[in-house]
Image: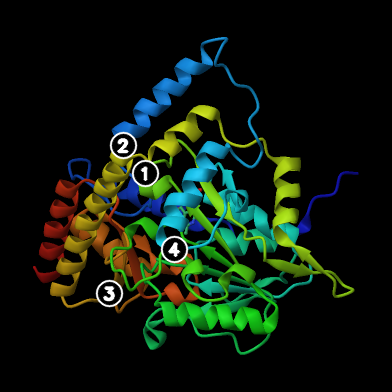
Amino acid sequence: MIKINENYLKLQASYLFSEIGKRVAAYQKANPDREIIKLGIGDVTRPLPPACIEAFHRAVDEMADIGTFRGYGPEQGYEFLREKIAAVDFQERGLEIAPDEVFVSDGAKCDCGNIQEIFGADITVAIPDPVYPVYLDTNVMAGRTGGYADGRYEGIVYLESSHENDFIPELPATDVDLIYLCFPNNPTGATISREQLQAWVDYARDNRALILFDAAYEAFVRDPDIPKSIYEVNGAREVAIEMRSFSKTAGFTGVRCAYTVVPAECRGYDSAGQTHAIRDFWLRRHATKFNSVSYPVQRAAEAIYSDDGRKQGRALTDYYLRNAALIREEITALGYDCVGGENSPYIWVDGNTDSWGFFDLLLEKAGVVVTPGAGFGKCGQGFIRISAFNNYENVQQAMEKIKTAISG
Ligand code: PLP
């Protein structure tokens, strides 16, 4: 008899985007002539930078020629890409990261979902609320939680983000082993200061814990006082893994390329208290289960680091930041409290009412789709997330419609 992993039965149905889809479809059916503008999902809308497209084409041509064809690549990613990542994203900024500490993958989603399997089943995990759901669900699947009740899984230490703490969770009151942090944050758009991040790194060092730092949105950081990387704070190399993605920074959501940094000094412990290099475990896992990303995709990602690629990538994030600034300005002018939208593509708006009620109001009165905050966790109740990933003209139009709907 084939038994299933019963931990999957604990998972809550991923109700958020299907429920949004249902409500939008019902609205469209009832109002076939009304245009709907979607500021709900976190997918990009702009095409790939030309430098990436050229590199992509060149690499495809190489695959067509017997002299330059390539089969399986190195599991950790081609050296040409890992060297650029280490040099430009870290060393140029004074951060000591070597190419052999970089693991190229097909997405930060996979990396932040998969990495937990190299840690013990009985560790205590701290997860933000509200949260990008992958961190939570993958730990549920792995059996690190009890059942679900009242919006919470038993056994997880929730790191709450609210007005009270300016959307930066406080250090846990009890001991935790694995900590997920994401800044600039999805869904809140909040950013963390170096001092606040230092406190987390100090906690991890004092408690022999490990931080998984999801920096998928680092390319939106413009303020030099806001850290783009956790390695900007002292002592992070021993206690932090960082995940990054080309998805939002270079429009790669449909291309798939990301990377994870595991510094050589990061240590985990066995039950006898012996230390082990986490990088060796991740390399073993990677080599066993993954055959890396296709050659043309890695060449396209490499092109982001060329002079043209850097300018074009910057222009892409500038474009979305302009949208975010407009959303933030208009929402604030309407009298709502919000966070994010600066150094981040998400705006987290306190609707002062039920999340789904606010969602319905904006859909029905303005024809604008946002994401109800309650779908990201208990602390998201009362909020909505507005995404800046759309065309500027659509964002302008959406904000006009919201203004008319709210202020009459
Ligand atoms: N991490 C966060 C916080 C995200 O919001 C997303 C995508 O929305 C990802 C990771 C996934 O990135 P990728 O496209 O590289 O899988």
Residue 6 occupies quadrant: bottom right
Give the percent coordinates (x, y) of residue 338: 27, 74
Q: Is mark 3 within 8 Å of ligand 1?
A: no
Q: Nearer the viewer, residue 162 or 304?
A: 304
Mark 2–mark 1 Cα distance, whole angstroms, equals 7 Å
Q: State left or right for residue 67 relative to residue 9.
A: left
Disc 2: which residue = 49
* Residue kind at label 1, given as amino acid type: Ala
Q: Earlier in the sequence, mark 2 or mark 3?
A: 2
Give the percent coordinates (x, y) of residue 88: 42, 51
Mark 1–mark 3 Cα distance, whole angstroms, equals 26 Å
Mark 1 surroundings: few (<14), some (14-19) or many (≥20) residues within 10 A: many
Is residue 11 visible in the rendered structure shown here? Answer: no
Q: Is residue 275 above or below residue 38?
A: below
* Mark toward the viewer: 2 or 4: 4
* Mark toward the viewer: 1 or 4: 4
State the SS at label 4. loop
Residue contact at pointers 4 and 3, CB within 8 angstroms: no
Q: Earlier in the sequence, mark 2 or mark 4?
A: 2
